[in-house]
């Protein structure tokens, strides 16, 4: 995030490089930087003549170089943006000579999504020397709620902690998808308001009471009735609550409980730091650790692995996901 802000700040100050290689798994930041360059570097009157957008599958590296070597028609700079540049992976190395001596009046932007250019290659080193290389990495799940809060704060909104976790639980760490859902919420929720779990339920379709976050809490509290209500709901809404996501989150939870048991310093800040969670949730882990000793947690992690194998159809072709989950809950809670 800091690196993104620096790139944007440098461009705003006029410190613009001739080549930008924006690459990596997380497309959100690649799009944000590319869109900022597309929207702000040239004046509106210049864009029709000196700004071009191409897609990797529709253009060759040699053609890109030809365009890049041209002079701008009416302004001081021309902007060339190559979207889906990963489609050029087989010939991207051919850009090396140009990258070593780029045209100073051209701003060439490569949106190289979901992949990275080999850092040992000459082309990577050449771009790194003459331009900017930005690697957009996937954000860890436990960092996403704070990112959501920061994004909303910029728009004069707040969000309830549980509401943020519901989004992460439902959408994972796909920032582009989360951003789109936040945009929907900001249309219906008044500015300077706090987005609540009810807002999430009403406008995105995620149940505020029956979700993986609530399931994890109910399991931690050993609230058998609540656990059964949630997994019954999951069984009736399997498309919105895939078992693979539930198993992954439960595995993370019990792994964190195992780490908690091993900690010498169990102060709130130390636990939050070691588990990678907000201090707001430390009490949930304290309560969970009381209900699940280390030996039981080791068993549960084994149960989770068995359920994961069954959910993939190994040795359990005819067993519905809902039944696998019910069996797993019985083993965890008893």
Image (cartoon, rainbow, N blue to C red):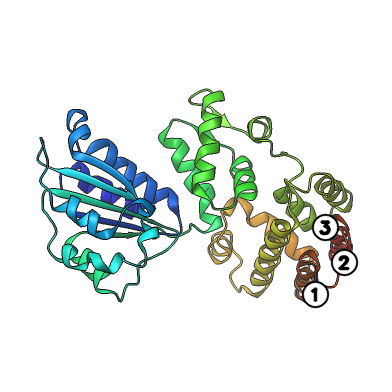
Between discs 3 and 2, the one toward the N terminus:
3
The percent coordinates of residue 127 (x first, y second) are 22, 64
Q: Quadrant of the C terminus?
A: bottom right
Q: Are marks 1 and 2 in contact (CB under 8 Å)?
A: yes
- Can residue 16 be seen here? The reply is no
Are circles 1 and 3 on residues that touch, CB within 8 Å? no
In primary-sequence order, the first of circles 1 and 2 is 1
Q: Give the vertical position of 158 relative to 330 (above or below).
A: above
* Residue with the mark numbered 3: 321
The residue identified by callout 1 is: 299
Q: Quote the CA–CA distance across marks 1 and 2.
A: 9 Å
Reading the image, the residue beneath label 2 is 331
- The CA distance from mark 1 to mark 3 is 21 Å
For discs 1 and 3, the disc positioned in front in the rendered view: 3
Looking at the image, which residue is at 44% across and 52% down?
Answer: 27
Residue sitting at 18 percent across and 66 percent down?
129
Q: Are marks 3 and 2 in contact (CB under 8 Å)?
A: no
In-front residue for pair 119/257: 119
Relative to residue 69, is residue 261 drawn left or right? right
Residue at disc 3, secondary structure = helix
> Which one is nearer the viewer's eye here, 7 or 115?
115
**Which residue occupies 64% across, 71% down?**
259
Q: Label 1: few (<14), some or many (≥20) within 10 Å?
A: few
Q: Secondary structure at mark 1?
A: helix
Picture quadrant of residue 73: top left
């Amino acid at each position: 995030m800091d690196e993104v802000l620096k790139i944007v700040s440098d461009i705003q100050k006029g410190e613009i490089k001739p080549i930008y290689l924006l690459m990596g798994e997380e497309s959100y930041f690649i799009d944000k930087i590319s869109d900022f360059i597309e929207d702000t570097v040239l004046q509106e009157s210049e864009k029709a003549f000196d700004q071009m957008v191409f897609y990797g599958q529709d253009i060759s590296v040699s053609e890109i170089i030809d365009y890049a070597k041209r002079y701008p028609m009416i302004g001081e700079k021309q902007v060339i943006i190559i979207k889906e540049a990963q489609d050029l992976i087989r010939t991207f190395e051919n850009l090396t000579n140009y990258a070593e001596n780029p045209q100073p009046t051209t701003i060439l932007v490569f949106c190289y999504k979901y992949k990275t250019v080999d850092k040992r290659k000459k082309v990577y080193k050449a771009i790194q020397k003459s331009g900017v290389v930005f690697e957009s990495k996937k954000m860890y799940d436990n960092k996403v709620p704070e990112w959501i809060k920061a994004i909303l704060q910029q728009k004069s909104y707040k969000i309830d902690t549980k509401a943020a976790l519901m989004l992460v639980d439902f959408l994972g760490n796909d920032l582009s998808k989360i951003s789109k859902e936040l945009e929907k919420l900001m249309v219906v929720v008044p500015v300077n308001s706090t987005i609540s779990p009810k807002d999430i339920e009403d406008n995105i379709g995620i149940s505020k009471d029956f979700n993986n976050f609530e399931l994890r809490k109910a399991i931690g509290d050993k609230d058998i009735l609540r656990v059964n209500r949630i997994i019954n709901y999951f069984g009736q809404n399997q498309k919105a609550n895939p078992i693979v996501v539930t198993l992954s989150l439960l595995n993370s939870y019990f792994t964190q409980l195992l780490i908690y048991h091993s900690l010498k310093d169990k102060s709130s800040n130390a636990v939050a730091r070691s588990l990678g969670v907000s201090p707001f949730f430390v009490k949930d882990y304290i309560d969970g650790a009381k209900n699940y000793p280390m030996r039981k947690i080791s068993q549960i992690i084994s149960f989770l692995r068995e359920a994961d194998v069954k959910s993939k159809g190994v040795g359990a072709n005819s067993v519905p996901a809902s039944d696998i989950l019910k069996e797993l809950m019985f083993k965890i809670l008893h």
